[in-house]
Image (cartoon, grey):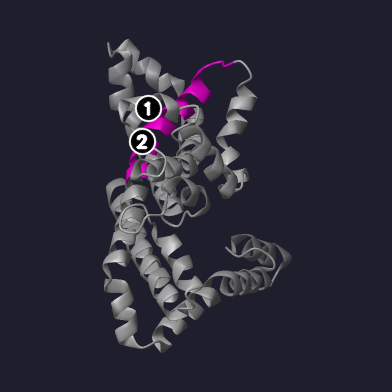
Amino acid sequence: MSVGAATRARLASPRLPGFGVSLGVTLAVVGSLVIVPLLALVVVVARAPSAHVWDVLSADRTLAAYGLSFGAAALAALLSTPLGLGIAWTLVRYELPARRLWDALVDLPFAMPTAVSGIALTQLWGPSGAFGRWLAPLGLEVAFTRAGVVLALIFVSLPFVVRTVQPVIESFPRETEEAAASLGADRLTTFRRVILPALRPALVSGATLGFARAIGEYGSVVFIAGNVPFRTEIAPLLVLVRLEEYDYAGAAAVATGMLVASAAILVILSRRGALRHG
């Protein structure tokens, strides 16, 4: 084979140099950090008596915790979507004073320990807090209620929507908006008919990521929730309760139920998004 032919064959190859080593390292890291722990969880449940596993999963307390975790996560994702869109739009389209500071604050829930954010939210929205004291005379309570759970989950899921939508807004061509305006479309019509369809895939992705993050949230919720069984007890807390009772099989069963349900929901959302935008 000539030098030219060898060069063309090398350039035409889809594989980068070191593909085998990179693939091996990737599989080793993913396997040791993700696959093996999940398999260990499944093994613990498989070895446990099936009757005990079923009793734990079908208990009213477990079902109530599941309902609150998944329901509050879904509601938080729905509320975070328009809020995140508004924040991303403001950061991109308007010249704000100290814009870099506001932009950095969006990532604060990523960097802040979740327990710290939970304590801060409880102090703000508690009956004697800066915000809660104004709601208490009206008979409205946020802390130690399901509303507090949703509030904490919005706090942790909102950055996912902002950071997913923001790059799309930045790259959206202004010429498209100008063309719509030249055809007589007002700003609302331009946003609804031109901009929003382009943002929809990013909004769906951001909401899905926020939902997935909120399902397993523990630190920011446990302080503001009140943790009352059947009312404000989330599923991750129930796992901890089972561990404190030395019921490792029961804790693994609750965790596995969350894992299976979360994976199923994410697969369904991903398929719908692929079919809608494919």
Q: Is residue 181 above or below residue 4?
A: above
Residue in the picture at 54% in, 77% down: 36
Q: Earlier in the sequence, mark 2 or mark 1?
A: 1
Question: Please, which residue is most extreme toward the right here?
Answer: 3
Q: Is the residue marked by circle 1 packed among few (<14), some (14-19), or many (20+) residues within 10 Å? A: some
Q: Is the residue marked by circle 2 packed among few (<14), some (14-19), or many (20+) residues within 10 Å? A: some
User: Which quadrant of the structure image shows residue 59?
Assistant: bottom left
Residue in the picture at 29% in, 78% down: 55
Q: Is residue 93 above or below residue 46?
A: above
Residue that label 2 marks: 141
Camera-nearest residue between 117 and 119: 119
Camera-nearest residue between 211 and 199: 211
Secondary-structure class at tag 2:
loop
Q: Quadrant of the N terminus?
A: bottom right
Amino acid, disc 1:
Leu
Amino acid, disc 2:
Glu
Residue that label 1 marks: 135
Stretch in magenta: 75-96
Whether residue 58 is visible: yes
Are circles 2 and 1 on residues that touch, CB within 8 Å? yes
User: Which quadrant of the structure image shows residue 269?
Assistant: bottom left
Residue in the picture at 33% in, 11% down: 182
How much space separates mark 2 and mark 1, taking CA atoms? 7 Å
Where residue 130 sits: x, y (%)?
A: 50, 27
Where residue 26 sits: x, y (%)?
A: 62, 68
Residue in the picture at 42% in, 49% down: 226
- Main SS, magenta region, reads helix
